[in-house]
């Protein structure tokens, strides 16, 4: 173990130095030999590492969303070249290159965090075995071995024997109770984080194998933490529990303020954004303008929630601009078709109603429709003396075969004589 630690001293030495610096600060407040001083030093180390990993976390989010967008295309490639694995891999790599995505980007925070976890594990293992490591000298080693968190030493494990636990100045029951509670909390936080991602921040319009993999990881990761957790020292459990809580809070913030397009979280966010913008008449935050700009740029590619957001602004007399700002409209009602094409202008005029067609008997006899139903085929209500002279001439009877002006209610042109009824 010492040989492995010496090979990775370039990692263990900086980690031990950071812990010692935090310990000297918290030792002045809680005492140098207390579990609070050493425990908060580990928590502070986690927070410092996660803050440094925020740029990688942002890149992970972008990569994950890009992979979700590519899932339909990836599925088509898999179905097209299902019998040719080599061609399938080539087409996949070509798709990644054209879109500028990298499947490994979603694993960057975990890969970047693993060296620090490895270094911390060896530092705490050195405390458990009573050997100095990094910048932790004999005096700091003795102080760390005295530190207890809720009665459990930092270097104690769930699987340790009673004699080993007693050598650290604790009881086996305290160690197992504390480690069991921390393992349960660690697994539960991991499960909730993954479940929150699957139920709220996944595009529900696309059903792909990627979603099935994420759903499987939702159950696999907590089991892995529970299995491996019984072999971790208490200090490492503090590290992982803090990491999981940070990840859960960080993801909740991202889901609340920058959700995945097409997800339930986006529907809730755009509903809040609509109320906020309509109340103030503008988008006041930079993040809001960024999201509005992205929605406007999509055009016909907007999803259901985004079209509803644009229509909500238009009904309130507001218009979203290409730069992400929102301005007041000119009072025109703006709507949007199903394909995302905006249509603006005054409300459409009501359609002209066509007159109902008369029956054959009404046309032949010239009987007008009942009063109250104006139509171009009904007789005029003007008096006889007000009508033109041409209108007072008697119309020719149908059946003469000559062209003449049709009587009111009759068709123009020659009329076909009635056929004699068969008796």
Image: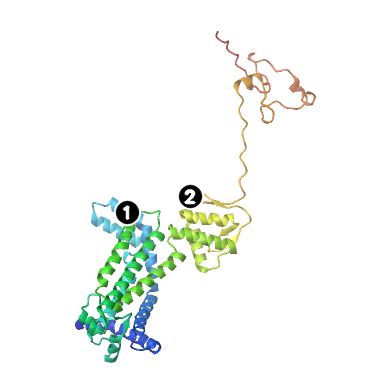
Classify 213 as above or below 343: below
For residue 339, the mark is 2
Report which quarter residue 204 is drawn in.
bottom left
As helix, strand or loop, the secondary structure at mark 1 comes to helix
- The residue indicated by pointer 1 is 75
Residue 160 placement (x, y as % from top left): 22, 77
355 or 91, which is in the foreground? 355
- N-term mark: 2 or 1: 1
Report whether 6 appears left or right of 95.
left
Q: Residues within 10 Å of mark 2 (few under 14, many from 20)?
A: few
Judged from this view, the residue extending furthest toward the right is: 385
Residue at 60% from the left image edge and 27% from the top image edge: 357
For residue 291, the mark is none
Report which quarter residue 34 is drawn in.
bottom left
418 or 188, which is in the foreground? 188
Q: Quadrant of the C terminus?
A: top right
Q: Residues within 10 Å of mark 1 (few under 14, many from 20)?
A: few
Residue at 39% from the left image edge and 89% from the top image edge: 28
As helix, strand or loop, the secondary structure at mark 2 comes to loop
Judged from this view, the residue extending furthest toward the top is: 423
């Amino acid at each position: 173990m010492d040989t492995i630690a010496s090979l990775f001293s370039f990692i263990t030495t900086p980690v031990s130095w950071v812990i010692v610096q935090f310990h000297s600060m918290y030792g002045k407040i809680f005492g140098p030999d207390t579990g609070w001083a050493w425990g908060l030093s580990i928590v502070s180390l986690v927070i410092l590492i996660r803050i440094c990993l925020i740029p990688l976390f942002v890149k992970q989010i972008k990569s994950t969303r890009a992979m979700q967008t590519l899932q339909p295309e990836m599925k088509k490639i898999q179905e097209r070249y299902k019998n040719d694995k080599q061609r399938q891999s080539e087409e996949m790599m070509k798709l990644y290159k054209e879109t500028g995505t990298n499947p490994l980007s979603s694993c960057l925070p975990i890969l970047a965090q693993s060296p620090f976890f490895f270094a911390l594990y060896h530092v705490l293992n050195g405390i458990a075995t009573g050997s100095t490591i990094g910048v932790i000298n004999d005096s700091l080693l003795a102080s760390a071995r005295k530190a207890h968190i809720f009665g459990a030493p930092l270097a104690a494990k769930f699987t340790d024997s009673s004699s080993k636990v007693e050598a650290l100045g604790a009881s086996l029951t305290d160690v197992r109770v504390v480690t069991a509670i921390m393992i349960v909390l660690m697994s539960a936080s991991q499960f909730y984080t993954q479940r929150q991602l699957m139920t709220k921040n996944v595009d529900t319009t696309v059903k792909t194998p990627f979603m099935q993999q994420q759903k499987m990881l939702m159950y696999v990761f907590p089991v892995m933490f529970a299995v491996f957790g019984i072999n971790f020292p208490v200090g490492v459990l503090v590290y992982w529990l803090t990491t999981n809580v940070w990840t859960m809070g960080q993801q909740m913030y991202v889901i609340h303020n920058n959700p995945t397009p097409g997800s339930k979280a986006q529907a809730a966010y755009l509903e809040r954004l609509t109320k906020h913008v309509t109340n103030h008449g503008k988008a006041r935050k930079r993040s809001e303008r960024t999201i509005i700009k992205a929605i406007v740029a999509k055009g016909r590619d907007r999803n259901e929630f985004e079209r509803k957001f644009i229509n909500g602004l238009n009904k309130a007399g507001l218009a979203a601009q290409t730069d992400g700002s929102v301005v007041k409209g000119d009072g025109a009602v703006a709507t949007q078709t199903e394909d995302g094409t905006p249509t603006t202008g005054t409300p459409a005029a009501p359609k002209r109603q066509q007159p109902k067609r008369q029956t054959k008997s009404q046309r032949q006899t010239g009987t007008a429709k009942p009063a109250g139903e104006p139509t171009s085929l009904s007789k005029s209500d003007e008096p006889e003396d007000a009508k033109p002279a041409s209108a007072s001439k008697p119309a020719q009877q149908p059946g003469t075969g000559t062209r003449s002006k049709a009587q009111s209610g009759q068709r123009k042109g020659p009329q076909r004589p009635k056929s004699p009824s068969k008796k």
